[in-house]
Image (tube, rainbow, N blue to C red):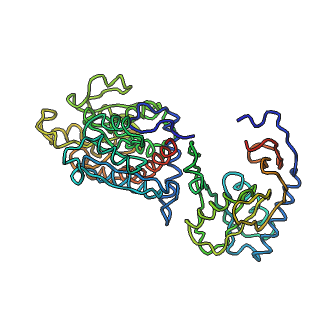
Amino acid sequence: MMQHEKKHEKLIMDGHEVARALTRIAHEILERNKGVKGLALVGIRTGGVHLAHRLAKRIQSIEGGTVPIGDLDITLYRDDLALRKDQPVIRKTAIPFNISDLKVVLVDDVLFTGRTIRAAMDGLIDLGRPAEIQLAVLVDRGHRQLPIKATYIGKNIPTSRDENVQVFLEEEGEEDRVVILNGGAP
Amino acid sequence: MSLKQKDLTTIATLTPDEIMLILETADSFKEVSGREIKKVPALRGKTVVNFFFEPSTRTRTSFELAAKRLSADVINFSPSSSSVVKGETLLDTARNIEAMQADIIVLRHQAAGAAETLARGVKSSVINAGDGWHEHPTQALLDLFTMREKHPTFKGLTVAIVGDIAHSRVARSNIYALTKMGAEVRAVGPPTMIPAFLDRLGATVHYDMDEALRGVDVIMMLRLQLERQGRALFPTIREYSRLYGLTADRVRLANAGAMIMHPGPINRGVEIAPDVADSFSSVILDQVTNGVAVRMAVLYLLAGAN
């Protein structure tokens, strides 16, 4: 893993832009769902979990009330498990509430092929029957391989397939920013 | 990261990191067993064959549930209903099972080394579910998992294993695993049931149970194999029970809140008093619950090593 060796890094969103995008998404979620009633946020591990917490904080400060938050690990639902040599590390799914009949907003950092979201929806439905599943992403970079579309998007970024979009967040000890790294996936 | 080895036949070849990987993976799988829909698609399309030459309810059911919760297909073989009664060898039977594209074979056999022999002869992954007096790796892993729920680090943990150490595959696997993780292990039992050179495995030997229980965090009782009576290992069950049975009075000698474990099936009133087996400190049924999660972890990690 040598991806940080002087690789060309292009800044797409700085910390302020990330913050503004999240604030706008929080408003859009409230507008579309007419408040926080019956609403839940579920972050996809790991980037999505931090973003879900940030969104919940914003939603609560705008509207009051509390929004339940859960963490979803999609590893067991990946469609490439049988193809890989190394089993990916499984983290814990922690959704401490019943999602049935809730409007669940899935939160992820980057929307790319759509395969992660497919896995996340299967994972969610194994836990109950949500009234609705919506999708919030910080970045939509295109190149979908499945018919999946985000409900809320922080920023659309046109990319080529071999570019690598990375979201860095303070929760992981980085400065908030979104960048494109050239030279393929890490 | 996944296990580098194809099979799990012994704890002896696992590194402390690999043991931690299994325990941490099991931690995630425990959540699945608590769901309303206790199933994830991780091993969809894989076939797990349970191949049990000895009677077992707990272990076989546990492996079967673990495989099913991962969406694998499970087949149960027992020698009485298979060609083994017609004289087919273990390896030949296994090769036939393998020819039907079995991915993982779970073997329980009365001969020590049976799992290792099988593992060398077939391409499928082999999991040792108990081979004679040798090892029972998944039992040790679920025991460690259960200890870790209360004691997050093994360093500084003191565990007494009490009973027929010499004939116990559970004891052997636990001694390997616990000493690797830095725990202190005291082997307790009558001299006839303590094997020679146990100190080479890093365990200390104690013949006086009361003395050995002082200051321990975990008391692991082993089943007295009643079928061994009359082989000059112990004079009477009553005497054994008086000297090495776990009573409420003896539990008080250990550290406050010491965990009481038993791999099952228990002989109530022989190696463990009924009130102790059912007490608040007893984690005997937690061990069974955790067994499914640990076996899911092992199946998942080995499926990646193929």
Q: Find residue B221 and report its image quarter.
A: top left
Side of A12 where B256 appears, left or right: left
Q: Find residue B132 and report its image quarter.
A: top left
Nearest the eye: B162 or B39: B39
Residue in the image at 57% along x and 40% along y: B1
| Residue B62 locus on image (x, y percent) | 37, 53
Side of B2 where B213 appears, left or right: left
Nearest the eye: B6 or B208: B6
Position above or below: A148 against B84: below
| Residue A176 locus on image (x, y percent) | 82, 48
On the question of residue B248 being in view, the answer is yes
Number of marks present in the image shown: 0
Nearest the eye: B111 or B61: B111
Residue in the image at 53% along x and 51% along y: B28
Residue in the image at 59% along x and 56% along y: A79
Name of the residue lying farthest toward the bottom: A34
| Residue B143 locus on image (x, y percent) | 40, 43
Position above or below: B280 against B17: below
